[in-house]
Image (spheres, grey):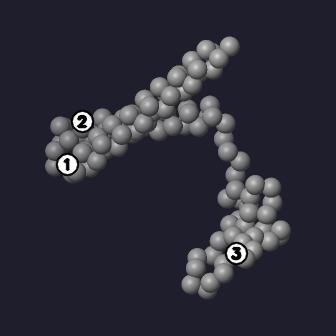
Amino acid sequence: MRLLNPQQVHGDIFRLEQTNPRHVSGRRDQAELQPAEDFRSMLFDGLNNVNQLQRDHAELSVQAIIDPESVNPHDVTIAGAKANMSLNIARNVVDRVIRAYRDVINIR
Protein backbone atom coordinates (compact mmCIF):
# COMPACT_ATOMS: atom_id res chain seq x y z
CA MET A 1 0.00 0.00 0.00
CA ARG A 2 1.53 3.29 -1.09
CA LEU A 3 0.65 6.27 1.14
CA LEU A 4 2.39 9.11 -0.75
CA ASN A 5 3.33 9.66 -4.34
CA PRO A 6 6.32 11.82 -5.38
CA GLN A 7 4.09 14.70 -6.53
CA GLN A 8 2.89 15.17 -2.96
CA VAL A 9 6.35 15.53 -1.42
CA HIS A 10 8.39 18.74 -1.51
CA GLY A 11 11.34 18.56 0.90
CA ASP A 12 9.94 18.03 4.38
CA ILE A 13 6.48 19.27 3.36
CA PHE A 14 3.92 16.98 1.77
CA ARG A 15 0.45 17.66 0.45
CA LEU A 16 -2.41 15.53 1.74
CA GLU A 17 -5.00 14.25 -0.67
CA GLN A 18 -8.63 13.52 -0.01
CA THR A 19 -9.18 9.78 -0.36
CA ASN A 20 -12.79 9.67 0.75
CA PRO A 21 -15.45 12.23 -0.19
CA ARG A 22 -16.59 12.38 3.45
CA HIS A 23 -13.11 13.41 4.65
CA VAL A 24 -12.07 17.02 5.00
CA SER A 25 -9.90 18.18 2.14
CA GLY A 26 -6.18 18.29 2.94
CA ARG A 27 -5.42 21.13 0.52
CA ARG A 28 -3.51 24.06 1.96
CA ASP A 29 -2.50 27.22 0.25
CA GLN A 30 1.22 27.91 0.09
CA ALA A 31 0.55 31.26 1.82
CA GLU A 32 -0.39 29.33 4.98
CA LEU A 33 3.00 27.61 5.08
CA GLN A 34 5.05 30.41 6.58
CA PRO A 35 8.63 29.87 7.70
CA ALA A 36 9.02 29.63 11.45
CA GLU A 37 9.99 32.77 13.31
CA ASP A 38 13.26 32.90 15.13
CA PHE A 39 13.23 32.01 18.81
CA ARG A 40 13.90 35.56 19.97
CA SER A 41 10.87 37.05 18.24
CA MET A 42 8.65 34.18 19.39
CA LEU A 43 9.83 34.67 22.97
CA PHE A 44 9.23 38.44 22.89
CA ASP A 45 5.80 37.99 21.29
CA GLY A 46 4.91 35.50 23.99
CA LEU A 47 6.08 37.84 26.75
CA ASN A 48 4.10 40.70 25.22
CA ASN A 49 1.04 38.46 25.16
CA VAL A 50 1.55 37.58 28.84
CA ASN A 51 1.90 41.28 29.65
CA GLN A 52 -1.32 42.11 27.77
CA LEU A 53 -3.24 39.39 29.61
CA GLN A 54 -1.95 40.77 32.93
CA ARG A 55 -3.06 44.29 31.94
CA ASP A 56 -6.49 43.07 30.83
CA HIS A 57 -7.00 41.37 34.18
CA ALA A 58 -5.87 44.46 36.08
CA GLU A 59 -8.22 46.69 34.08
CA LEU A 60 -11.18 44.38 34.62
CA SER A 61 -10.40 44.14 38.34
CA VAL A 62 -10.26 47.91 38.71
CA GLN A 63 -13.45 48.31 36.71
CA ALA A 64 -15.16 45.69 38.91
CA ILE A 65 -14.22 47.70 42.00
CA ILE A 66 -15.17 51.10 40.59
CA ASP A 67 -18.39 50.07 38.78
CA PRO A 68 -19.41 46.51 39.75
CA GLU A 69 -22.55 46.54 37.59
CA SER A 70 -20.58 47.07 34.36
CA VAL A 71 -18.46 43.93 34.68
CA ASN A 72 -19.49 40.31 34.78
CA PRO A 73 -17.72 38.55 37.68
CA HIS A 74 -17.12 35.53 35.44
CA ASP A 75 -15.14 37.72 33.03
CA VAL A 76 -12.90 38.90 35.87
CA THR A 77 -12.34 35.31 37.01
CA ILE A 78 -11.60 34.10 33.48
CA ALA A 79 -9.19 37.00 32.86
CA GLY A 80 -7.43 36.19 36.14
CA ALA A 81 -7.12 32.51 35.23
CA LYS A 82 -5.74 33.36 31.78
CA ALA A 83 -3.23 35.81 33.26
CA ASN A 84 -2.13 33.31 35.90
CA MET A 85 -1.80 30.44 33.41
CA SER A 86 0.16 32.51 30.90
CA LEU A 87 2.50 33.76 33.63
CA ASN A 88 3.16 30.21 34.85
CA ILE A 89 3.86 28.99 31.31
CA ALA A 90 6.19 31.94 30.66
CA ARG A 91 8.01 31.29 33.93
CA ASN A 92 8.53 27.61 32.99
CA VAL A 93 9.80 28.50 29.51
CA VAL A 94 12.26 31.05 30.88
CA ASP A 95 13.46 28.59 33.54
CA ARG A 96 14.05 25.91 30.91
CA VAL A 97 15.86 28.32 28.61
CA ILE A 98 18.16 29.32 31.46
CA ARG A 99 18.71 25.67 32.38
CA ALA A 100 19.55 24.82 28.75
CA TYR A 101 21.96 27.76 28.55
CA ARG A 102 23.70 26.61 31.74
CA ASP A 103 23.92 23.07 30.36
CA VAL A 104 25.53 24.33 27.16
CA ILE A 105 28.00 26.46 29.12
CA ASN A 106 28.90 23.50 31.37
CA ILE A 107 29.60 21.26 28.35
CA ARG A 108 32.76 23.21 27.58
Residue positioned 83% across, 68% down in the render = 6
Q: CA distance from mark 1 to mark 3?
A: 47 Å
Please report contact status of discs 2 and 3: CB closer than 8 Å, yes or no. Answer: no
- Which numbered tag is attached to residue 62? 2
Instruction: Name the side, left or right, on which 75 lies relative to 13.
Output: left
Residue positioned 70% across, 75% down in the render = 17
Can residue 40 be seen by looking at this rendering? yes
Amino acid carrying mark 1 in the image: Pro
Q: Position of residue 36 (x, y in %)?
A: 67, 45
Q: Nearer the viewer, mark 1 or mark 2?
A: 1
Q: Position of residue 89 (x, y in %)?
A: 42, 36
Can you identify the residue that label 1 sits on?
73
Crowd tier of the residue under label 3, counting other residues whose Cα lies within 10 Å: few below 14, some 14–19, many 20 or above: some
Can residue 55 be seen by looking at this rendering? no
Can you identify the residue that label 3 sits on?
17
* Residue nearest the observer in this picture, 58 or 94: 94
Instruction: Name the side, left or right, on which 57 lies relative to 72.
Output: right
